Image (tube, rainbow, N blue to C red):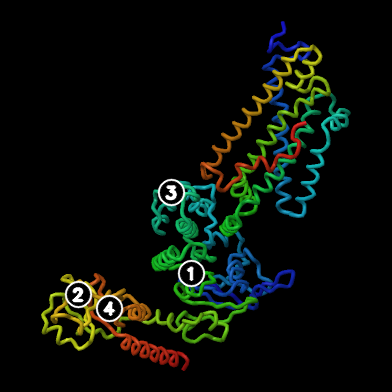
């Protein structure tokens, strides 16, 4: 009865079901974070004085423990997935906002001047020049945010059954089945590696214009800079 | 014609970048704005396509105030070339060049065909069409920049230090290419540089600006070199402006001497008849082999194994007096060798003869100036 993939029935999911749930709970917040970060970064790019305070706010948000978020949110959103995903989305901003701002700022002045001189309006210039050139930096940010989000979903176990694969950790304790904890950790790690690989593929596909082999120009090694202290908790 | 009419650019902090500047930029010619950094030359250029708006004054394009048409329309009617090219690194070469035509609503196919045509025009191998900017050298990128500016066939071309970031050899090639393209297309080009040599080489008219954005002198390059308006312009032109001015006088009127030119197999009597101490020895094809000293010939004939190098020859029909003088200065004998387009010797000329030709050209130039002044 106590097989590696035998999930206790109170979790209400098969192993595959938990994986699906985990992916949803981890990736939707990153997507929402990206949608939020893009206009935020655009505003920070235009009004430079806004960038330090915005960055400060995202850092403070990141410093708030998820448990504290849950206590506040549970009154409004109950013991649902949403209660887990809202903090995760806010956490992703600490990586995504600077990634986008720095990416957009890395567009050379000559390129911007040339675009303006050719009659690009501000919107067209942002969409057709700045964002595409910032793509590698944005994807580097997405990689960090995604990996971090995949591990953070587990804390959902604190508010009942909302931790997806993280619930296995609680179950391992409750039923004294350590193999469930091993399963949980290994599966999450595999998911993180897989998602990261997909994002790398996405970048390669989106940026045929980047020099291959060695990061001569653009930030393939941005992850270290962007990873905040203690990304996993 | 572009008419800049007492234009001033003052920034909120009080800095004056351009101070009551007035210029008439003639059609179908290259007008160069030159001056030290901080003289407002780039600001002036950017006011023409309204990337910078003047504080006072107006700019007229063909008689109409440039404020009176939508800014994007104005910009799309003016090609713009910038230092380091400013290419879109995320687009292929052909798509970079096709940018403005695409914005003007051309079909994809037509815009790409036009782009390929322009690659040929600026001397780029069309096999580079599908490459990305990072795969090109600096000089090639700059050519792409020029092609991109020409893509929609704008009547006006604005060039902001386009060749400053490439090495001197590549720069010279790009300058020659620009003059060739200009000969074919006849655009109205406004060209900004801090390099007075580049200004003199390219400009039909040269505007020298001084710090604070004031016009020091506006004149054709030859006049600039011969009669600088004041000490500032004179300093800016540098110490050798007299030599550089010789670029504007052709070497064609030089009187060539053929007396001292002898074939390698010339008999002793022919050599004995030469009046000068040096003989220029030519090969059977008429090309120069080198100089021989008459007094040191062993048996009165030439030993081609013991010749002095003849240095660099000049082509009287194509080169200037500056080149001829340079050849004479470099020559071990002080005589310059003149050749035709095929490299065959047409004669030799001494430094003294070149000096006389320079004096004659100067006095002819002065007479011309007085006629204009009167």
Report if residue B151 is visible in the image.
no
Q: CA distance from mark 1 to mark 4?
A: 39 Å
Indicate left or right for A126 with B80 as reference. Answer: right
Residue A173 location, quadrant: top right
Query: Which residue is tagged 3?
Result: B129
Indicate left or right for B169 with A98 as reference. Answer: left
Q: Position of residue B225 (x, y in %)?
A: 47, 83
Q: Could you say whether the residue bearing mark 3 is in a helix, strand or loop?
A: loop
First-in-chain label (3 vs 1):
3
Query: Is label 2 on the same chain as label 3?
Result: yes
Label 1 chain ID: B
Q: CA distance from mark 2 to mark 1?
A: 47 Å
Query: Which residue is tagged 4?
Result: B337
The residue sitting at 51% across, 80% down in the picture is: B238
Label 4 chain ID: B
Q: Position of residue A20 (x, y in %)?
A: 68, 21
The dot on residue B282 is 2
Residue B243 location, quadrant: bottom left
Residue B86 location, quadrant: bottom right
- Single out the mark in the foreground, 1 or 4: 4
Compared with residue B359, is residue B93 higher up or lower down, i.e. above or below?
above
């Amino acid at each position: 009865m106590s097989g590696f993939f035998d999930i206790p029935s109170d979790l209400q999911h098969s192993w595959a079901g938990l994986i699906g749930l985990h992916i949803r709970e981890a990736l939707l917040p990153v997507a929402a974070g990206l949608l939020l970060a893009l206009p935020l970064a655009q505003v920070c790019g235009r009004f430079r004085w806004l960038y330090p305070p915005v960055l400060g706010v995202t850092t403070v948000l990141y410093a708030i423990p998820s448990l504290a978020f849950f206590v506040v949110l549970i009154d409004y959103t109950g013991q649902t997935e949403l209660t887990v995903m809202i903090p995760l989305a806010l956490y992703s901003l600490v990586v995504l906002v600077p990634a986008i701002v720095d990416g957009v700022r890395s567009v050379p002045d000559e390129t911007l001047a040339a675009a303006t001189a050719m009659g690009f309006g501000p919107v067209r210039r942002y969409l057709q020049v700045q964002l595409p050139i910032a793509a590698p930096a944005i994807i580097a940010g997405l990689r960090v945010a995604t990996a971090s989000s995949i591990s953070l979903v587990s804390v959902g176990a604190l508010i009942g059954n909302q931790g997806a694969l993280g619930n296995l950790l609680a179950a391992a304790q409750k039923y004294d089945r350590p193999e469930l904890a091993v399963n949980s950790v290994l599966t999450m790690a595999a998911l993180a590696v897989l998602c990261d690989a997909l994002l790398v593929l996405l970048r390669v596909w989106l940026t045929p214009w980047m020099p291959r082999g060695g990061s001569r120009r653009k930030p393939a090694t941005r992850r270290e800079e962007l990873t905040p202290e203690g990304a996993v908790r | 014609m572009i008419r800049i009419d007492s234009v001033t650019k003052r920034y909120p902090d009080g800095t004056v970048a351009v101070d009551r500047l007035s210029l008439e930029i003639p059609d179908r010619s290259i007008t160069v704005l030159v001056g030290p950094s901080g003289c407002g030359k780039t600001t002036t250029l950017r006011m023409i396509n309204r990337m910078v708006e003047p504080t006072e004054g107006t700019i007229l394009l063909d008689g109409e105030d440039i404020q009176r048409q939508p800014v994007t329309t104005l910009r799309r009617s003016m090609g713009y070339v910038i230092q380091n090219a400013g290419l879109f690194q995320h687009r292929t070469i052909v798509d970079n060049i096709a940018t403005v035509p695409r914005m003007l609503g051309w079909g994809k196919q037509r815009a790409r065909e036009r782009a390929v045509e322009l690659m040929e025009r600026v001397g780029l191998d069309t096999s580079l069409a599908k490459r990305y900017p990072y795969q090109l050298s600096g000089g090639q990128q700059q050519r792409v920049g020029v092609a991109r500016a020409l893509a929609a066939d704008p009547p006006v071309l604005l060039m902001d230090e386009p060749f400053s970031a490439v090495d001197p050899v590549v720069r010279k090639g790009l300058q020659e290419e620009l003059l060739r393209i200009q000969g074919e297309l006849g655009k109205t080009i406004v060209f900004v540089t801090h390099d007075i040599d580049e200004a003199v080489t390219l400009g039909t008219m040269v505007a020298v600006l001084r710090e604070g954005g004031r016009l020091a002198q506006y004149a054709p390059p030859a006049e600039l070199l011969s009669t600088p308006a004041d000490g500032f312009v004179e300093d800016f032109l540098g110490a050798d402006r007299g030599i550089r001015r010789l670029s504007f006088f052709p070497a064609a009127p030089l009187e060539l001497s053929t007396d001292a030119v002898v074939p390698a197999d010339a008999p002793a009597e022919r050599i004995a008849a030469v009046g000068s101490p040096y003989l220029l020895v030519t090969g059977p094809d008429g090309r120069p082999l080198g100089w021989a000293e008459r007094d040191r010939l062993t048996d009165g004939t030439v030993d081609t194994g013991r010749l002095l190098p003849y240095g660099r020859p000049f082509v009287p029909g194509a080169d200037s007096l500056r080149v001829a003088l340079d050849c004479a200065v470099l020559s071990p004998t002080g005589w310059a060798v003149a050749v035709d387009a095929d490299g065959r010797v047409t004669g030799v000329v001494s430094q003294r003869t070149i000096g006389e030709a320079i004096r004659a050209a100067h006095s002819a130039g002065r007479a011309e100036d007085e006629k204009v002044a009167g």
